[in-house]
Image: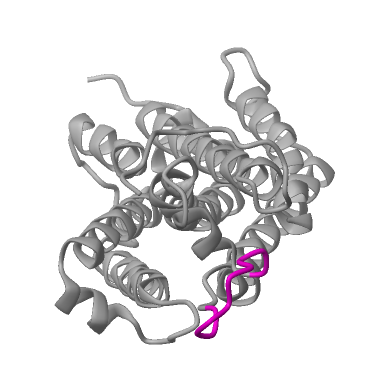
Amino acid sequence: MTKSNNPVETIPNGPDAAAILAAGIGCALVGILALAGDASDRIGKLLNIYNPVGTLSGVTTLAIIVWLVSWFILNQRCGQRQSTWPRSMWSHSSGWPLVCC
Amino acid sequence: MGFGALFMLAFSGALAELYRISAPGAPSTMSTREQNLLNFYLLAMVALAWLTVFSGAYVIYPWYRAVPPAGVTDLADYPRRLLLSSGKTSEWHNVGMEWKEHVAWLAPIATTMVAYVTIKYGRAIFQHRNMRIAVLSFAVAAFVATGVAGAFGAFLNKYAPVRGGKVIVLMQGEK
């Protein structure tokens, strides 16, 4: 096995992985909650936390909170290590915003 | 709209720079000045992105979806109701505005992540192919989301017709 001389390879990519995956979760949640709010009156009312803005207020607030919390948790869990996530995981995380669109 | 336009304009520069430093054959290090400039540029974009969506959602959008008092027949000051009042324009709200109000929020989330990763790792992140693809994908997705939101916004403002412009039928609604 050839040892790499590139110092870049030794930098833990955990924080990067955590940020990318959390952003994917946040983006996906915007789409999922928007769909749920439109599909169900009950969920729509629950998401209406600021009446002038309607369900959009709850959708975006909840998505932002989940995004930040998941980022924090993921960063705690894999922040100092080299991620060995498979390539497909990267593909999925990077594709989530496109799916959400 | 001002924040959004600036954000959209800034995107072309950010995408070009992200691609430039990640392209094959690019120098493996960046000077401190280059790195600081890129960091400042990305942070300004993040600020613009969040200002755009928060001002749009909490300043402009309440005006858009205001409910007219009973008996009001002139809906010029109530854009949502104006659009929904005719089958020729109702889909501008049902499709256009519904898309615009949600898809725009992808941009600040994605841009924040792109800025964080780029600032934290600098040129190093682009040595990892899969990460580079993920970061660039999010940057492009944010650009597309901003473009979709901006385009729908422009049509809604100018030709929906909210300002009395020519009616462009997006899809024929029921009403």
Q: Relative to A74, does residue B94 appear above or below in the rendering?
A: above
User: Does the magenta portion include B41?
Assistant: no
**On the picture, is A84 further left or further right than A64?**
left
Q: Nearer the viewer, residue A50 or B142?
A: A50
Image location of residue A16, percent across then percent down: 40, 51
Q: Main secondary structure of the magenta part?
A: loop
Q: Nearer the viewer, residue B5 or A15?
A: B5
Question: Which quadrant is home to the N terminus of chain B?
Answer: bottom right
Q: Quadrant of residue A9?
A: top left
Range drawn in magenta: B68-77
Q: Residue at x 50, y 64 (%)?
A: B81
Q: Residue at x 54, y 79 (%)?
A: B68
Image location of residue B111, percent across then percent down: 55, 51
Q: Residue lying farthest right?
A: B33
Q: Relative to B18, does residue B95 appear above or below in the rendering?
A: below
Image location of residue B26, percent across then percent down: 65, 19
Q: Nearer the viewer, residue B152 or B48?
A: B152
Q: Residue at x 61, y 66 (%)?
A: B75
**On the picture, is B124 further left or further right than A50?**
right
The colour mode here is one colour
Q: Quadrant of residue A31?
A: bottom left
Q: Nearer the viewer, residue B123 or B100?
A: B100
Q: Relative to B106, does residue A41 appear above or below in the rendering?
A: below
